[in-house]
Each structure stands twice: as structure tokens, then as C-alpha cells.
Amino acid sequence: VQLQASGGGLVQAGGSLRLSCAASRLTFSNYNMGWFRRAPGKEREFVAAITWSDGTWYENPAKGRFTVARDNAKNTVYLQMNSLKPEDTAVYYCAAGRSDVLQTMDAWTYWGQGTQVTVSS
């Protein structure tokens, strides 16, 4: 299984980015897909997830600004991030799993390599 995250970069505060995570060698439509991030000096934390049945979940910092979506035909999950803030600066990771526990790192089976998002003030 491979998860390839992309779309990170440098953006000014208030700007937008769309992250993508392409999955291979798994039955994508059967998996929940999630996004986590690790800010400098902090632990990795849950950001958002979309279940195999298209249910969506967001951690509080992401609510109202981020949107998670999936395209099963392309085996890809997206994270649209709007109104970005400097505190959103982090390495963003995608994950795949089949647990109903979405916010816990241990519940996810497969991880991508991460993509850097830097938001300047």
C-alpha cells in the first residue's frame, strides 16, 4: 500500500491550498481516509477524515475552513484548506484505515509521507 500526499507549499495568511493523497494497492472505497498534521515542536494531531460511506469529521481548528472529500474513481482524498492561518503551518499526513475511531493515530493502518504546509503572516 502506498499513500502519496502532495499539494503543500508556502502561502500567505488568508490563502488557500488543496492537498491531495493518492492511494495505491488497496481497495480505496473500503477505507476511511484521514488527515493529520504535525506542527513544529508538537505532536501529530487529527485534522479531518472522511469515511468509506462519505461521512466527514473535523477537529475544531479545521471546522468551517477545511473540507475533506474523496474521489473513489481516482483513489484520491483531498483536503481543501481555506482562510489559512500561521498556526496551520505543519507537515500534513494522509492515512487510511478501517477503524471507526478516527481521531486516534493508532487506529489508522497506512500513512503517507507528509507534505509541508507553511503559512506566512
Image: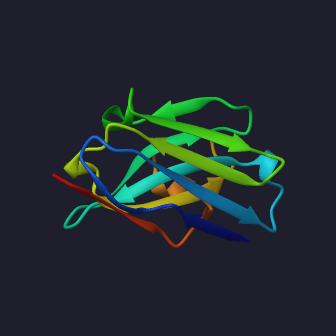
Quarter-of-image position of residue 94: bottom right
Name the residue located 41 percent from the left edge and 48 percent from the top edge.
Answer: 46
- Depth order, front residue of 83/22: 83
Whether residue 115 is situated above or below residue 12 in the rendered picture = below
Q: Position of residue 1 (x, y in %)?
A: 73, 71
Quarter-of-image position of residue 3: bottom right
Name the residue located 37 percent from the left edge and 36 percent from the top edge.
Answer: 62
Name the residue located 42 percent from the left edge and 45 percent from the top edge.
Answer: 47
Locate residue 72 relative to residue 2 in the image: left or right.
Answer: right
Query: Which scheme is used to colour this image of the protein?
Result: rainbow
| Residue 101 visible in image | no
* Figure disc tally: 0
- Depth order, front residue of 66/58: 66
Whether residue 62 is situated above or below residue 113 in the rendered picture = above
Locate residue 48 relative to residue 75 in the image: left or right.
Answer: left
Whether residue 76 is situated above or below residue 61 in the rendered picture = below
Residue lying at the far left in this picture: please name it.
Answer: 121
Q: Where is residue 54 in the image (x, y as percent from the top left)?
A: 69, 32
- Depth order, front residue of 91/15: 15
Q: Where is residue 67 in the image (x, y as percent from the top left)?
A: 51, 35
Quarter-of-image position of residue 65: top left
Whether residue 82 is situated above or below residue 92 in the rendered picture = above
| Residue 121 visible in image | yes
Q: Where is residue 57 in the image (x, y as percent from the top left)?
A: 51, 32
Locate residue 34 relative to residue 82 in the image: left or right.
Answer: right
